Image (cartoon, helix red, strand yellow):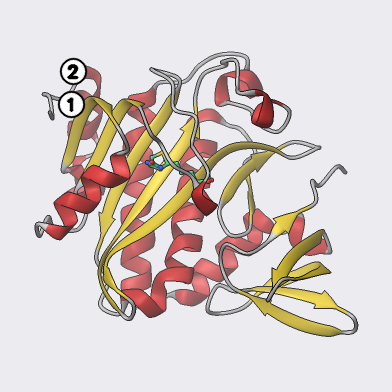
Amino acid sequence: MAEPLPPDLIHALVSAEPRLAGFARLRYFPEVDSTNDIALQLAAAGAPAGTSVLADVQRAGRGRRGRAWFSPPGAGLYLSVVVRLPDAAATLPLLTLAVGVAVADAVSTTSGLPIELKWPNDLVIGRPWRKLGGLLCESTGTGAQVDAVVVGIGINLRQVAYPPEIAERATSIETELGRPIERAALVVETLARVRDAVDRLRNGEGDWVCHEWRRLGRAGLGGASVTWSEQGVAHRGAARDIDDRGALLVETNGRVERLIAGEVTWERLRD
Ligand code: BTN
């Protein structure tokens, strides 16, 4: 059941109203299975763009490639936003990059931390890379008939004991900064920047997305090693760039391969 917004969130949303417009439609749940599930239901029922869902804990938070997303109470930002774009199926790869830029910049602005992006949209920091957040885009509709996209945003806020399989690679804002930051401020900065990024895409500013993504993802694009599998065959190459539709360009055996979201495993960048 949705509950009234906590006072700190109301205050932060009201203060940022001019930057948020429709993206101030925030629904708050103390506990859910997944904020993406609720946002997908709302989107399917016709909820307008900018409708978003925030929870304190997720019982079944999910990440990319069918992985679980560790979502203990009060330790993370668990937020899902409904996005509507005219040609959503075609724009989806670029949309995920655009929202990655928005969220990375929101975390940097709110915390001062130098967040980087690892394609397609992991928020990482430091050497070796540690993951601080990630995005999961899911859509209503089928195939080319995408009706709405739900962008699920998970950011590790507090220092907690992570499950062993991610403990070595995960970090949080509190761990990196030495103190926690206010969730309400990060929620509002994130919503404002996601709104701006989506507006830019709607206005045909794909170049802006690529330029901003390269700014935050340039370390990996300097030749970091990636592996992927194609029809059961494993490949390895060096990441070089992204293209204007959001694909990763990888140099392998003297030619350039174009990879689309979700297939790639990165070696951790260490220096
Ligand atoms: C990733 O694998 O990196 C993506 C993680 C996305 C997690 C967020 S938390 C809010 C939303 N609800 C979910 O169940 N997943 C996303």
Q: Position of residue 230 (x, y in %)?
A: 69, 74
Which label belongs to residue 242?
none
Number of labels in the image equals 2
Q: Position of residue 120 (x, y in %)?
A: 58, 59
- Check disc 1: other Cα within 10 Å, few if <14, some if 14-19, many if 20+: some
Residue 22 seen in this snapshot: no
Could you tell me the amino acid type at mark 2? Pro
Could you tell me the amino acid type at mark 1? Ile
- Residue at figure coordinates x 26%, y 47% from the top left: 19
Ligand 1 is in which quadrant of the figure?
top left
Q: Position of residue 65 (x, y in %)?
A: 54, 53
SS for callout 1: helix
Q: Which residue is mark 1?
A: 10
- Residue at figure coordinates x 85%, y 77% from the top left: 252
Contact, CB < 8 Å: mark 2 with mark 1?
A: yes
Quadrant containing the C terminus in the rendered view: top right
Farthest bottom residue? 255
Q: Splitting the image into 4 quarters, where does residue 238 fall? A: bottom right
Q: Splitting the image into 4 quarters, where does residue 89 fall? A: bottom left
Q: Which residue is mark 2?
A: 7
Q: In 3D space, how far apart are the residues under numbered discs 2 and 1 (Cα atoms)?
A: 5 Å
Left or right of residue 252: residue 206 = left
